[in-house]
Amino acid sequence: MSANHKLEQLDFAVIGHQESWNDIKAFINGMRSDDVGDLSLEQVKNTFGYIPPRSVFKMKVRSKTDALIHGVYIETFIEPDKLGMQHLRTNITKVNEAIAVAQSLNAKIIALGGFTSIVLEGNLSTFNTTETKITTGNSLTAAYILKGIEKASKKFNVDLKSSNVLIIGATGDIGMACTNYLKGSVKNFLLCARNKRRLEKFSNEISEGGCSVSYDTDLSRLLPQADIIISAASSNDIAIEHYKKPVIICDAGYPKNLELKIAKTEGISLFHGGMGHIGYGYDFNPDYTKHFYRYPLPHIGHGCVLEAVVLAFENKFENYSNGKGNISNLKIDDIYAMSIKHGLELAPFYNSKGLWT
Ligand SMILES: NC(=O)c1ccc[n+]([C@@H]2O[C@H](COP(=O)([O-])OP(=O)(O)OC[C@H]3O[C@@H](n4cnc5c(N)ncnc54)[C@H](OP(=O)(O)O)[C@@H]3O)[C@@H](O)[C@H]2O)c1
């Protein structure tokens, strides 16, 4: 390569991780050639975590404007049962290694998919000096959550202005963005998170702005009042019991196990939120989708990933969503408008049982 020949640039890179060992087993065996045979779950578990982050497949995404962008998926090989605080150091190392892979591939922007943005607490300032920009994707995720709530409320004739809206994970990046956006549009906020000091501080800020707010670290005290619930917390310990009927629930948290904790679903309309639909489609090469794609319709993707896609379509290479608590209403409106321009719309309503009928 001559000195002035620059490596060709990729428009975007997506950094991600798998949600469960069953997904991983299917994914790993799907990547292996037929003649070497499948690995057992135990063999997969014994090796997966030792694989360094690497690019796994290429992507091409099409826009309504006819633009075509090129990207890559980089797997972190973070183990699904090692997402807790005790593994933070290892996971930060993996995410940083994955970012280095994206930089070596000359990606113009990186989407930090799923848990990978939480590992870094959205703090991307150390990467600001590089040519590769990074986004947590939380602005478009919040936009799809909010549009979903708006659309579901209309569908069930629920007036937002007369509703008590419960935000689980209210002090997180997405929870704060949704709460701030809904200020003035709902009757009362019910805010929930585990850390009382942070919850109290945020709730006071919201009520000082003239909104009615109740907050509690104990979800069971808020649930009986909620007409609408946005769950934007990683939901291992969240149980939906003794809730008001009917209730609309937008489950945007990961891992996706909120539905497992709902004993009776009577009166609940639950959808998986923060998801978009890529209207003009994509191609993966190699195409492993049959091994890991779990949605009820083709071309559905996470808001956090689609934000980088939209920014790449727009040639807007910047750390669009960065840090915690920095998502303004304007950012949400702007990224949503850009998303629509390129044919990326709110995903149809679905949950673990399939599409809403
Ligand atoms: N659908 C999508 O495309 C998409 C995109 C990005 C992120 N996500 C998911 O959205 C969720 C929120 O992301 P984020 O970036 O906002 O995360 P974050 O900044 O870490 O916020 C998480 C929030 O949840 C609270 N929380 C955690 N466990 C809780 C529990 N058991 N009960 C009540 N509150 C709890 C946290 O506060 P305390 O620690 O004080 O409890 C915090 O307020 C994550 O699960 C993430 O994986 C989805």
Image: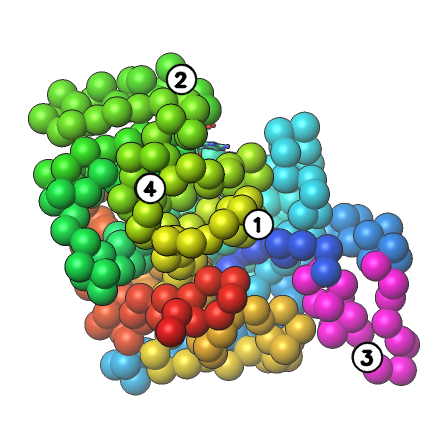
Amino acid found under the numbered disc labelled 1: Leu
**Quadrant in which the C terminus appears:** bottom left
Mark sitting earlier along the chain (3/2) = 3
Left or right position of 303 against 97: left
Q: Which of label 1 and label 2 is nearer to you?
A: 1
Q: Could you give the CA–CA distance between mark 2 and mark 4, rounded to whole angstroms?
A: 24 Å
| Residue at numbered disc 3 | 33
Say few, some or many: other residues with alpha carbon within 10 Å of mark 1 (under 14 / 14 to 19 / 20 or more). Answer: few
Mark sitting earlier along the chain (2/4) = 2
Residue 196 is marked as 2
Amino acid found under the numbered disc labelled 2: Lys
Say few, some or many: other residues with alpha carbon within 10 Å of mark 2 (under 14 / 14 to 19 / 20 or more). Answer: some
**Quadrant in which the N terminus appears:** bottom right
Residue 16 seen by the camera: yes
Specify the quarter for ligand 1.
Answer: top left
Residue 173 quadrant: top left
**Tag 3–tag 4 contact (CB < 8 Å):** no
**Tag 4–tag 1 contact (CB < 8 Å):** no
The colour scheme is rainbow
Mark sitting earlier along the chain (4/1) = 4
Residue 260 is marked as 1
Q: Which of label 3 and label 2 is nearer to you?
A: 2
Label 4: which secondary element? loop
Residue 244 is marked as 4
Q: Residue at x 49, y 50 (%)?
A: 264
Q: Residue at x 55, y 78 (%)?
A: 284
The residue nearer to you, when weighing 156 against 71, is: 156
Residue 180 quadrant: top left
In magenta, the rendered stretch is: 23-41
Mark sitting earlier along the chain (1/3) = 3
